[in-house]
Image (cartoon, helix red, strand yellow):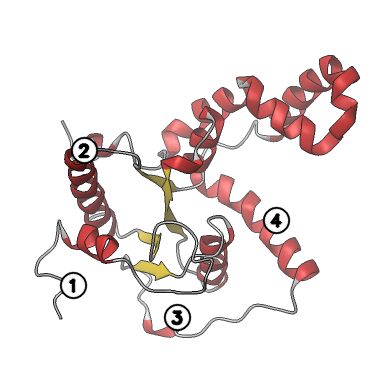
Amino acid sequence: MTEVDRFADIRPYRDEEVPAAIERLIQDDEFIGAIAKYRFGSLMSWLGWAIRPLIRQFLRHKWAKVSTIHQVQMGVTRYMSRMIATSTQGVSFSGLEHLKKEQGYLFVSNHRDIAMDPAFVNWGLHTHGFDTVRIAIGDNLLIYPWIHKLVRVNKSFIVKRGLNMRQKLEASALMSRYMHFAMKEKHENLWIAQRQGRAKDSNDRTQDSVLKMMAMAGEGDVTER
């Protein structure tokens, strides 16, 4: 078994897995229904039988030439560009001149929104010529199978929640090995929130458990004081 195979349950999809993942999304009734409800609202109650096949046809045509993670992310980039232009007064970044493009980095940020927190990190990296991040996302948020597929197409890796103590330790060790492997051997950038769940009280303290997990596959103890 190769090193990459060991991470098959948690890692993002690879390029060669993208076409099949997209086809599974198109065939997923819940995914199509979610899009239909968002775009057409109450019309679904009496025209759903006609709308669903049209959405499938549209997506199959739109995604016909999408075969890599990079192509998927370019679609996200267009969305981010419109969103920033229409809903902000601009976004600025600093410190990127200290990073090397051929090296993998771990970005740890505060946590306000699981989608937009890493999206803004990605925007800063992309607009400055860096590779985007692989995003850590808890499986408690993947409430439907189609969400699980969708996030892995967009470079997310899965943090397993709701485990007993032994399973939690094993999952943390696997996660740590994956993160070290992705950064050191694949030179990938990673993003992880500094704590589980959003900091609704603005108390942005990094959880010791996050630091311990990151150190499990490395050397030393990052929680020593």
The residue nearer to you, when weighing 165 against 59, is 165
Residue flagged by tag 4: what amino acid is it?
Answer: Tyr
**Residue 135 location, x and y as percent?**
43, 54
Q: Is residue 219 left or right of residue 163?
A: left
The image shows residue 186, relative to residue 49, as above or below, that is below
Q: CA distance from mark 4 to mark 3?
A: 23 Å
Residue 201 appears in the rendering: yes
For disc 1, the marked residue is 223
What secondary structure is marked by label 4? Answer: helix
Circle 1: is it few (<14), some (14-19), or many (20+) Cα within 10 Å? few
What secondary structure is marked by label 1? Answer: loop
Residue flagged by tag 2: what amino acid is it?
Answer: Gln
Chain-order first, disc 2 or disc 1: 2
Residue flagged by tag 1: what amino acid is it?
Answer: Thr
State the residue at coordinates (52%, 49%).
70
Q: Quadrant of residue 58?
A: top right
Chain-order first, disc 1 or disc 3: 3
The image shows residue 98, relative to residue 168, as above or below, that is below
Residue 184 appears in the rendering: no
For disc 4, the marked residue is 79
Chain-order first, disc 2 or disc 4: 4
Image quadrant in which the N terminus is located: top left
Q: Which mark is residue 122?
A: none
For disc 2, the marked residue is 167
For disc 3, the marked residue is 96
Q: CA distance from mark 1 to mark 3?
A: 26 Å
The residue nearer to you, when weighing 173 against 89, is 173
Q: CA distance from mark 2 to mark 3?
A: 37 Å
Residue flagged by tag 3: what amino acid is it?
Answer: Leu
**Residue 54 location, x and y as percent?**
81, 22
